[in-house]
Image: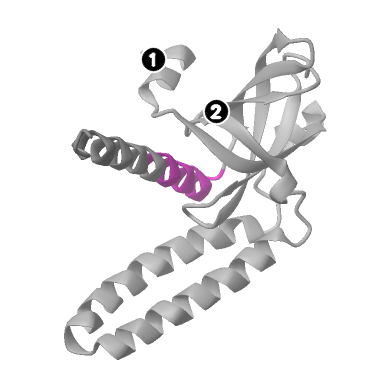
């Protein structure tokens, strides 16, 4: 049987910089979960599935007519731009909310200038750029550690996350890990001067 610590260690964790916003929520709100929240958060999951299907079609079209394939790529980019705008309406996410985080499919940690009480419930909005996804999770503060006079490391375990959003989060973490490995590999292959 796995405990929570074992489960966290089994999850990929990455250091990343994402747009993040959170707010404190009471226990009653946390107990209700996220099932009744607005559908703009699940839009990203739907678009991801459709983009995968479009990619398959574009690859097939590329063999037959590259101009039509290029048109489909442009249309897909336009749809993603509109979807991104729709997702941010009513959200607290913006360019100023970009934070360095340690991120996984089961939790995250981030620094901020003020402490948050251990056990406090949070509603957290995250924008995952690799997925063009805005997701909402509920979490509980597991640790709040002061590292400098005005810098606290807040560690959060997710308590409520939609399955589709967790899949998007996993894909984001894997893509970021892959990008970092590719960058490291290309840096190692550069000739010495």
Q: Is residue 32 left or right of residue 61?
A: right
Q: Which residues are magenta?
A: 162-174
Sequence-wise, which precedes: disc 1 or disc 2? 1
Callout 1: few (<14), some (14-19), or many (20+) C-alpha neighbours within 10 Å? few
* x then y, percent, for residue 167: 44, 46
Q: Is residue 3 visible?
A: no
In this picture the colour scheme is one colour
**Considering the image in quadrants, where does the N terminus appear?**
top left
Q: Is residue 143 visible?
A: yes
Describe residue 144's horizontal placement relative to residue 45 as left or right: right
Determine which residue is flagged by label 1: 2
Q: Which residue position is annotated with label 2? A: 107
Residue 5 in percent (x, y) is at 46, 13
Secondary element at tag 2: strand
Q: Which mark is residue 122?
A: none
* Residue drawn at 51 percent across, 35 percent down: 16
| Residue 90 in picture, x, y percent from top left | 79, 58
Q: Residue at x 57, y 30 (%)?
A: 101
Q: Is residue 122 above or below residue 144?
A: below
The residue located at (30%, 35%) in the rendering is 184
């Amino acid at each position: 049987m796995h405990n929570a610590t074992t489960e966290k260690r089994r999850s990929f964790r990455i250091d990343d910089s994402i747009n993040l916003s959170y707010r404190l929520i009471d226990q009653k709100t946390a107990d209700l979960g996220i099932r009744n929240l607005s559908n703009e958060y699940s839009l990203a999951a739907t678009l991801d599935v459709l983009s995968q299907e479009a990619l398959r079609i574009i690859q097939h079209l590329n063999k037959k007519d590259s101009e039509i394939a290029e048109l489909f790529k442009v249309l897909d980019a336009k749809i993603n731009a509109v979807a991104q705008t729709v997702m941010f309406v009513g959200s607290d996410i913006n360019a100023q909310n970009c934070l360095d985080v340690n991120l996984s499919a089961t939790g995250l940690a981030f620094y901020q200038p003020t402490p948050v009480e251990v056990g406090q419930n949070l509603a957290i909005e995250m924008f995952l750029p690799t997925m063009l996804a805005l997701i909402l999770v509920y979490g509980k503060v597991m640790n709040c550690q002061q590292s400098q006079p005005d810098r606290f490391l807040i560690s959060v375990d997710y308590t409520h996350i939609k399955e589709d959003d967790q899949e998007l989060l996993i894909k984001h973490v894997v893509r970021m890990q892959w990008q970092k490995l590719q960058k490291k590999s290309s840096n190692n292959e550069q000739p010495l001067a």
